[in-house]
Image (spheres, rainbow, N blue to C red):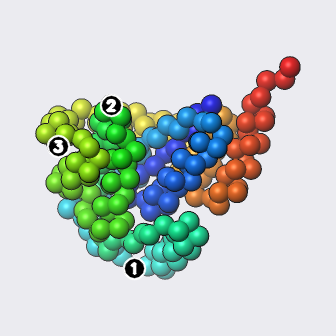
Amino acid sequence: MKIFLYYDYICPFCFLATERVLDLAREFDLEAEWLGFEIHPEYPAEGKRRKKTERTIRISETLENVAAEAGVEIKLPGFVTNSRLCLEGAEFAKEKNRFMEFHKACYTAYFREGKNIGLLETVLEAGERAGLCPEELSESLRKRSFSEKIEKNMESARENMVLGVPTLYLGELRIHGIQPVESYRKLIARELLREKPLH
């Protein structure tokens, strides 16, 4: 069976969910399909300062707890940005069998190094780290070769009532947000049992 995971590069919880999903896919012998979904297309590529509100403070505290529990180093950058170039770059990376390398490089750039992943130079740098040819990636992004694919993902997200990311689908099972590994494990095991044909 396949796990479908809707994600975005400006979502810290998607970053934290990555390793969990990879581990679960190995454990249950599932194929993971990653669907890039732009949650804030209105954010400018040059970035804008992140406002400190009660909600962002609460999210930051939750994030710190989840990151500590997972043993993952993560730091919220002081700005928000547009993720479209990264999402299109990820589709290019899939074609070159370098998706996961690119995926992790984008998260590292934004959530560890505080770089603006809305800018072409940062996306190309992530591509180079992932072993992609910068010229080919640049050409693909310039031509917007995978723009339609992201639009299709957005449409699919709307049809599947995806209200935020990360959202994981397995058969009839839909899980919104990041969950403890044990919760994922129980829900997936139950869904796989439900899907098993009776003999």
Q: Which residue lies furthest to the right in this view?
A: 199
Residue name at image x 77 percent, y 42 percent: 190
Which residue carries the number 2 mark? 95
The label nearer to you, 1 versus 3, is: 3
Amino acid type of disc 3? Pro
Which residue carries the number 3 mark? 134
Can I make out residue 105 in this image? Answer: yes
Mark 1 → mark 3, Cα distance in angstroms? 36 Å
Which residue carries the number 1 mark? 52
Sequence-earlier tag: 1 or 3: 1
Q: Which residue lies furthest to the top in this view?
A: 199
Residue name at image x 26 percent, y 43 percent: 131
SS for tag 1? loop
Sequence-earlier tag: 1 or 2: 1
Q: In which quarter of the image is the N terminus?
A: top right
Amino acid type of disc 2? Glu
Quadrant assignment, res 48:
bottom left
Can I make out residue 148 in this image? Answer: no
Q: In which quarter of the image is the C terminus?
A: top right
Rendered position, 87 above or below 177: above
